[in-house]
Amino acid sequence: MEQVQQLSPGVLAEIVDRAVCNVKERKVFAENLRNELSNYSYQQLPEDSNEFSAVKAIYEGYTRNGDAEKFYGKYYATVAAKSTQFFSGISRNAATLLATKVADCLLAYSKQQKHSTKSSHHVKAVLSDKEKAGMQYLGGYVLHNLHKKHGRANSVESQQAMAILKAGKLESMTDSSQKLVSALNRGGLWSITQPAQQIFLKAECHFRQFTSKPDLQRLDISGITNKATSDSDILAYYSLMVSDAELEPDSHVCKDVLHSIVSLYVHVRSFSFAKDIIQHYKIKATQTKARALRKEISRSCQGDDQQRQE
């Protein structure tokens, strides 16, 4: 029997904090509500409180049956309808808005935990600070490029796709860990959220796994993309991104956008990989020529010495 994912007061507090950040960063919400939540400090519920027990029961019910519709029905009737009891110290409108975002984050958290539990193989890679900065820069380029591409189309699907992509962007350039983007930005670069960074990190892991083979003759871009888009961790982090979108996208749009994100990352990463190989061979060829020249000069000098001795 599959083990039910447990919810603790500390985990719930982290989920609420995430929901608060989502509201603050999304200009689609009323400014007065965003300002109110910007000054809000959530008080962690005691584990034996009626409020926490209610949220925990609803959450664990969903982890058992996987019925999102039933989850939302129970959650809205119990939590959203009495939002000020669960999120005290703010107005009813702000508390209700926060409650709805917490519901979305709870589902995203459940999916993340489920995928992490089922994953039997995790590809890992440790990136240096320089490599991580490059990954962040490339990730921002990918999301921004795809966002501009969909912006040129006038369709419902494109609007949904843009909402997903925008959910991977940090609204403010305050993340000190993304120094390369901050240093090079002139208004057109995107800093990316933590879920987006994790998607690109996992994609980078799969790219390195495929390109670590000796005597590599060609890059299997489709193979890397398919492997990454079926990775349970990438799917979990992508669900977090989708939950932050201002619009609720259709399932086929979600699938297409994820494939586009990973595919473009792998393509651009392949260009840099090929460039590194070419540069490596150029350096190697230069060194070989230099050694050959030194050897020829040495032979010439030895021949001159022999002639003088004769």
Image (spheres, rainbow, N blue to C red):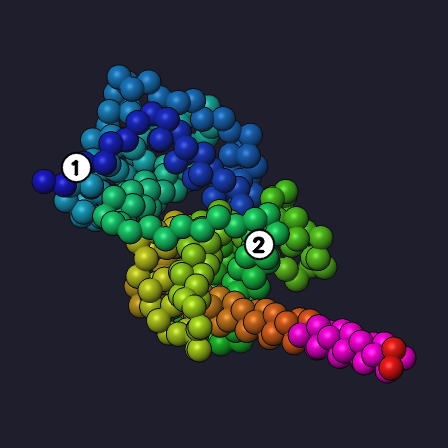
Residue situated in front as seen by the camera: 245 or 284: 284
Which residue position is annotated with label 1? 3
Residue situated in front as seen by the camera: 50 or 235: 235
- Disc assigned to residue 156: none
Q: Amino acid at mark 2?
A: Glu
- Which span is picked out in magenta? 288-308
Quadrant assignment for the N terminus: top left
- Find residue 146 and report its horizontal and vertical position in percent: 51, 69
The furthest residue to the front:
310
Residue situated in front as seen by the camera: 187 or 103: 187
Q: Is 51 on the left-hand or right-hand side of 275?
A: left
Disc 2 residue crowd, few under 14, some 14–19, many 20+, Cα 10 Å? few
Compare marks 1 and 2 and give the one earlier in the sequence.
1
Which residue position is annotated with label 2? 131
Residue situated in front as seen by the camera: 274 or 93: 274
Magenta stretch: dominant SS?
Answer: helix
Asked if the stretch drawn in magenta spans residue 295, the answer is yes
